[in-house]
Image: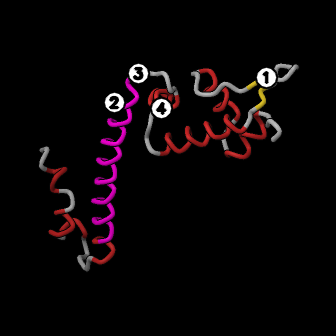
């Protein structure tokens, strides 16, 4: 497999090149350089970029991703457990939002705010006041 340029990789992943350079500056990527000093991304780099993208979409910070990708870093399990807890909380919130939205679609109330079943979907949030 031939190494790819920063432009090739950025285009394939639909990312600006400065994002790839930033990820390199914070230590997430370490592409090889050719004789002219240009970045050359290999298969392992491309896999790392896919992992970074998926992890960012799932809400991980770059610092958490650095821990995930560094096999010698201490605290990996703690970071990953904390991320799983965060995912569980976000998934629960998304499910509640989905249920509320589905109810709003079916509800016959003219003003959704007056529908007691719709309002019940936010009682846990209102309980904070």
Question: Quick one: 41 or 22, which is closer to the camera?
Answer: 41
Q: Quadrant of residue 121?
A: bottom left
Alpha-carbon span between mark 1 and mark 2 = 34 Å
| Element type where label 3 sits in the image | loop
Mark 2 residue crowding within 10 angstroms, few (<14) / some (14–19) / many (20+): few
Q: Which residue is mark 4?
A: 68
> Residue shown at 30%/78% (left/top)?
106
User: Is residue 71 placed above or below 52 in the rendered structure?
Assistant: above
In which quadrant will I find the N terminus? top right
Distance in Å between CA atoms under marks 2 and 4: 10 Å
Q: Residue 78 shows which numbered tag?
A: 2
The quarter holding residue 92 reads bottom left
Disc 3 to disc 2, how far (Cα)? Answer: 9 Å
For disc 3, the marked residue is: 74
| Residue 109 horizontal/vertical position (percent) | 23, 76
Q: Are marks 1 and 4 in contact (CB under 8 Å)?
A: no
């Amino acid at each position: 497999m031939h190494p790819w340029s920063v432009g090739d990789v950025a285009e394939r992943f639909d990312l600006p090149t400065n994002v790839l350079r930033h990820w390199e500056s914070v230590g997430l990527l370490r592409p090889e350089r050719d004789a002219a000093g240009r970045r050359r991304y290999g298969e392992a780099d491309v896999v790392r970029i896919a992992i970074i993208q998926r992890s960012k979409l799932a809400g991980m910070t770059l610092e958490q991703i650095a821990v995930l990708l560094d096999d010698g870093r201490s605290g990996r399990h703690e970071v990953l457990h904390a991320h799983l807890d965060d995912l569980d909380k976000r998934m629960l919130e998304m499910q509640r939002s989905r249920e509320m939205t589905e109810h709003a679609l079916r509800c016959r109330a003219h003003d959704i705010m007056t529908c007691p079943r719709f309002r019940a979907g936010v009682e846990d949030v209102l309980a904070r006041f």
